[in-house]
Image (spheres, grey):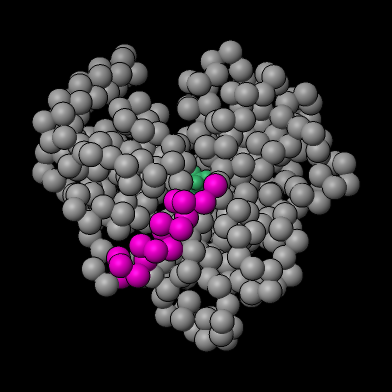
Amino acid sequence: MNGQLQRTDEVQLTAAIRVLKQQRQALILAHNYQRKEVQDVADVVGDSLALARAALHTDAKVIVFAGVHFMAETAAILNPDKQVLLPDLQAGCSLADTINADQLRAWKAEHPGAVVVSYVNTQATVKAESDYCCTSANAVAVVSAIPADREVLFLPDMFLGAYVQRVTGRTNMHIWLGECHVHAGIAPTDVHTVLQQHPTAEVLIHPECGCSTSDLYLLADGTLPKERTRVLSTGGMLRHAQESDVEEFVVATEIGILHQLQKQSPEKKFIAANSHAICPFMKEITLEKILTALRENRYVITVPTTIAQQARQAIERMVAVG
Ligand code: 13P
Ligand code: SF4
């Protein structure tokens, strides 16, 4: 009964959002980690790179960002003439909070002339101090494009940084010791335990995971099946699962992605490596809050002009690569 009531609420809220969205000429962007009912009401569901690109190419007057603060900030920087709404200001990011602009300036001073590559999970003030931004979908391509003799400062995710360093073989790369508490909580043993129960499954690992770096060693020594393990962004996981002939997948990332994976390939089976990998910031966004955001025009995300101008170049480089 409760489930039925909830479903009725969802249907009504979704219908109300659709009407208001049209009236306001709004576009709803949702990250793959959003609640399933939020993903279902969105115009575009995707990874950080896909959503940044969607924000860049829209004619909508208003962008409602069903994601976290840094994503809405990025959309606002790319669209100074549009209104960008984040339905709840509590939707932050523990990874983005691991470095601020003062800390980055001090780090740059220790490495004069180094090229700064910031993961998109950073505050706008940090992006303003950066040469390039990247996402998990194009981090390897961005770092590879930097001349080999230039030092690189990579921030803030240490697992993604270690992964990029290993793939590129770059020795002149310094990595900030930040982590996302959700992905860091997915341990190599989680992956192995689930894989033992599903021995023919493919393994899809997000490079922010604590398990991603050690899994690369386990891949090398044969503990994990090399031909069936992929390190991918959330968008990359969706593409790969669709193209693969395999029927079962062990998925090491935030579990919101399972909804899109299952929706896209209903005949396949997707198993979370760790069913507790839930981002509390992503889950702050609800249908009620999206409706209120559209009705009351809140919360408008703005970035001071000078910061936005400085950050824009690094973001545009990110959107152009990969
Ligand atoms: P992607 O969706 O770009 O892979 O990023 C994951 C993430 O943690 C976003 O916060
Ligand atoms: Fe930030 Fe981690 Fe949540 Fe992504 S999953 S928004 S990196 S806290």
- Judge left or right: residue 271 versus residue 9: right
Q: Which quadrant of the view contains residue 190?
A: top right
Q: Which quadrant of the view contains residue 310?
A: bottom left
On screen, 54 above or below 302? above
Q: What is the magenta segment's predominant secondary structure? A: helix
**Which of 156/304 is in front?**
304
Residue 224: image x %, image y %? Answer: 81, 39
Q: Quadrant of the N terminus?
A: top left
Residue range (magenta): 307-322
Q: Report the residue at 19% width, 49% height from top.
A: 82
Q: Report the residue at 19% width, 43% height from top.
A: 62
Q: Report the residue at 69% width, 19% height from top.
A: 245
On screen, 267 above or below 14? above
Camera sees residue 175: no
Q: Report the residue at 46% width, 46% height from top.
A: 49
In the rendered image, residue 312 lying in the magenta stretch gets the answer yes
On screen, 75 above or below 225? below
Residue 156: image x %, image y %? Answer: 53, 65
